[in-house]
Image (tube, helix red, strand yellow):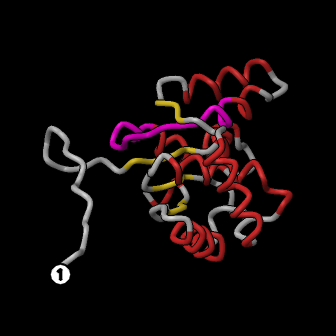
Amino acid sequence: MAGLSVPRPRATLDGVAKLRIYIDSSVFGGLLDTTLPQRLAATQAFLERVGEFDACVSAAVVEELSAHGDAGKRECLLSACRSLARIPSEGTEIDALVAEYLRWGALPASAQADARHVAAASVARLDTIVSWNFKHLVRLRTRRLVQAVNAAVGLAGVDIVSPEEL
């Protein structure tokens, strides 16, 4: 189609592009979930496969994990994300996008930290956010509103899925 601009696919050594994913803190928290054994197993299985993806976290994820009160559990959480790339979670573009998500009602004001995760991943132009947060993030309404806000501000959409979906 004339005038259609399609981004070039990302190249890899084997010719298949890796999905660029953002892993939020709830996924690492799944490593400590003793109330739902299936979530613990799904989290472990996902993190064992994380090398299949171009995976990253933000400084906000590291801050959230660092706030865990139990030193042993905190180290477990931090070691699980230590080798992953970091993207910024602060800055004027991210702050403005957080405000837009809240203004549009994509996320409630009480979920500003979640909006920051979505904004960081969107500004970094990642493909997917991986989360166990079904209350605010892994929801059809949230996905649709995030897509609408991103389109309105000229950013690509970002999928929001649970670890089981990858």
Q: Quadrant of residue 127?
A: bottom left
Q: Residue at x 65, y 29 (%)?
A: 77
Q: Quadrant of residue 147?
A: bottom right
Q: Is residue 110 left or right of residue 90?
A: right
Q: Viewer-proximal residue, 2 or 43?
A: 2
Q: Residue 81: horizontal and vertical position, in percent?
A: 55, 29
- Secondary structure beneath label 1: loop
Q: Residue 82: horizontal and vertical position, in percent?
A: 54, 23
Q: Residue at x 63, y 31 (%)?
A: 59
Crowding at mark 1 (Cα within 10 Å: few <14, some 14-19, many 20+): few
Residue 58 inside the magenta-drawn segment: yes
Q: Residue at x 61, y 48 (%)?
A: 93
Kindly give the residue lying farthest to the bottom in the view shown.
1
Q: Residue 65: horizontal and vertical position, in percent?
A: 71, 31
Q: Is residue 119 left or right of residue 55?
A: right
Q: Is residue 64 left or right of residue 9?
A: right
Q: Quadrant of the N terminus?
A: bottom left
Q: Viewer-proximal residue, 62 or 52?
A: 62
Q: Viewer-proximal residue, 24 or 59?
A: 59
Q: Is residue 137 above or below residue 43?
A: below
Residue 119 inside the magenta-drawn segment: no
User: What is the total number of numbered labels drawn onto the structure image?
Assistant: 1
- Magenta part of the protein: which range? 48-62
- Under mark 1, the amino acid is Met
Q: Quadrant of the C terminus?
A: bottom left
Q: Which residue is mark 1?
A: 1
Q: Residue at x 84, y 26 (%)?
A: 69
Q: Is residue 70 above or below residue 14?
A: above
Q: Is residue 145 above or below residue 42?
A: below
Q: Is residue 90 above or below residue 98?
A: above
Q: Viewer-proximal residue, 126 or 69?
A: 126
Q: Residue 153: horizontal and vertical position, in percent?
A: 55, 65
